[in-house]
Amino acid sequence: MFAWVAVVMAGASGHVTPDAPVYPLIATGTRATERFEFGSKHMGTTFRVVLYAADAATAKRAADAAFARVADLDNCMSDYKPTSELMQLCKAFATETGEPRKVSDDLFFVLSRAEELSKRSGGAFDVTVGPVVQLWRHARRTQELPDPKEFAAARAKVGYEKVKLDPAKKTVRLTTPGMQLDLGGIAKGYAADEALKLLKEKFGITRALVAAAGDIACGDPPPGKDFWSVDVAPIAKSQKPRTLNLANAAVSTSGDLEQFVVINGVRYSHVLDPKTGLGLTGRRSVTVVAPNGTTADSMTKAVSVLQPEQAMKLVEDTPGAAAYIVVLGADEKPVATASKRFPKFAGTE
């Protein structure tokens, strides 16, 4: 789903398997500033935790707790697990709208943030695209476009306005039967935020970084450093990786370098335009820096869908956010656009 993002400060990482949920990949430095790295499979990707702790035992306990938090959120927000809270919510409204259902604080928070961005982006970000996403997952496997009737029926269930939230009661109601919510464009960023938050609040570890594929949340920088250095892979072979300097901020990169399908000669990205239900056909890579992973993760999707001018306005209107968009033309030449705040993080201001 994401262009590759490498944490320069993290060094080399080892192989992580689902059978070994947590294990140290590397430990370096003096005892007073010892650095540890751990990896664990969650949400369809490898979560990495880089942290500085006084000793290995403390680091291991902290990483275990951080990954346990991510696992809980996966069980809450996954659209692949039938028993997840999200899927149970959708199941409750499968055949009728029914009464509002109370949900967990985590799920309500993420749905609230999703609704906020949906409104601000004019629907460019929309977690109700689930029915259409399911059709495109099938299309990628069969190399055939979705059936027109099924596609129309799925699109009829899409629309963020169909999700009714009650902040006072923490309840959710889906107004159209058969709706399917997909939090794939925001859940990883939130999970990274929560893992970083747990490290700080429960273990007093502030010098840490949590990475989930293209979604990275950074805390205080490593000892003796002013920031974490993060490399963002280019969309074109002719480009070099771009290094970002981050501290107490997050970055998310979304592109179609790997996840796309070509049908009848047309290249469709895995990133869908909620308004058309179609995968984007223009090749682009979007990097968003924001104060937290939840914002960065979700905004990459909205920025990918919007036209560059609209996208940059959304970014500029978001406090602390910055973006870098690279579009590949028919001649394979990249055209880059950066927001006003981006040079601050790219070290070019």
Image (spheres, grey):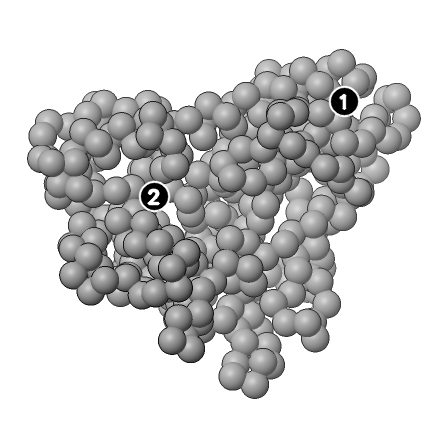
Q: Can you tell which mark lies on residue 53?
A: 1
Relative horizontal placement of residue 9, taking residue 64 as reference (left or right): right
- Asked which quadrant contains residue 156, the reply is bottom left
Vertical arrangement, residue 190 with respect to residue 21, above or below: below
**Identity, as a three-letter code, of the amino acid under mark 1:** Ala
Q: Nearer the viewer, residue 39 or 242?
A: 39
Q: CA distance from mark 2 to mark 1?
A: 36 Å
**At 20% across and 43% down in the image, what residue appears?**
179
Q: Is residue 248 visible?
A: no
The label nearer to you, 2 versus 1, is 2
Identify the residue at image location x=61%, y=67%.
235
SS class of the residue under badge 1? Answer: strand
Identify the residue at image location x=59%, y=61%.
342
Extreme residue in the bottom direction: 331
Residue 182, disc: 2
Q: Where on the picture, by quarter, is residue 147?
A: bottom left
Give residue 200's position: percent from left, percent from top: 62, 23
Left/right of residue 150 with respect to residue 243 in the rendered view: left
